[in-house]
Amino acid sequence: MIQVTEKAREQIIDLRKKEGYSDNHYLRVAVKGGGCSGLMYHLSFDAERKPTDEIFEDKGISVIVDKKSLLYLLGTVLDFSDGLNGKGFQFINPNASRTCGCGESFAV
């Protein structure tokens, strides 16, 4: 399961509206190769759910994840930081053995 904090929820709703997506668009969370630590998080909006996708709902946000990415993301919390040193969306991933300084890539 992937959890969404209240701050992340508010930001997702705001971004979806600003970018012209409807409430029917899912938040797609994926893991792709790259970055300083080997794996990178990828967020996007998607209207289609593939047969191999898993879906989670938290705080009214429907999150879809492909099965391969799910192996790396189980138990992850999606947060948002907007303070002076805010980085935007942040992943609190219990599966990550290390993360890079920017927090955008990780290793398991």
Image: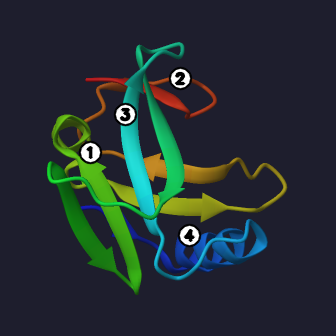
Furthest-right residue in view? 84
Which part of the image, by quadrant, shows the C terminus?
top left
Where does residue 106 sit, x and y in percent of width and height?
41, 26
Tell me the quarter of the picture where residue 99 sits.
top left
Q: Secondary structure at mark 2?
A: loop
Q: Residues within 10 Å of mark 3 (few under 14, many from 20)?
A: many
Element assignment for label 3: strand
Q: What is the C-alpha distance between the residues marked 1 and 3?
A: 8 Å
Q: Which amino acid type corresponds to the residue marked 4 in the rendered image?
A: Ala
Which is more N-terminal, label 2 or label 3?
3
Tell me if residue 107 comes above or below residue 62 in the rendering.
Answer: above
How was the colour assigned to the protein in this rendering? rainbow
The crowding category of the residue bearing disc 1, from other C-alpha atoms within 10 Å (few below 14, some 14 to 19, many at least 20), is: many
The answer to which of 86 and 3 lies nearer the viewer is 3
Name the amino acid, label 3.
Val
* Mark 2 crowd level (few <14, some 14–19, many ≥20, 10 Å Cα): few
| Image x and y of residue 43, in percent | 51, 48
Query: Which circle marks residue 31 in the picture?
Result: 3
- Residue that badge 4 annotates: 8
Residue at image x 70%, y 47%? 87
The residue at which mark 2 appears reads as 100
Instruction: Please identify, in this view, whether the residue under mark 4 or under mark 2 is nearer the observer.
Output: 4
Residue 73, numbered label: 1
- Tag 3 or tag 4, which sits nearer the N-term? 4
| Residue 68, position as x, y percentages in the image | 19, 34
Pick whichever of labels 1 and 2 is earlier in the sequence: 1
Amino acid carrying mark 1 in the image: Leu
Circles 1 and 3: CB distance less than 8 Å?
Answer: yes
Circle 1 sits in a helix, a strand or a loop, which is it? Answer: helix
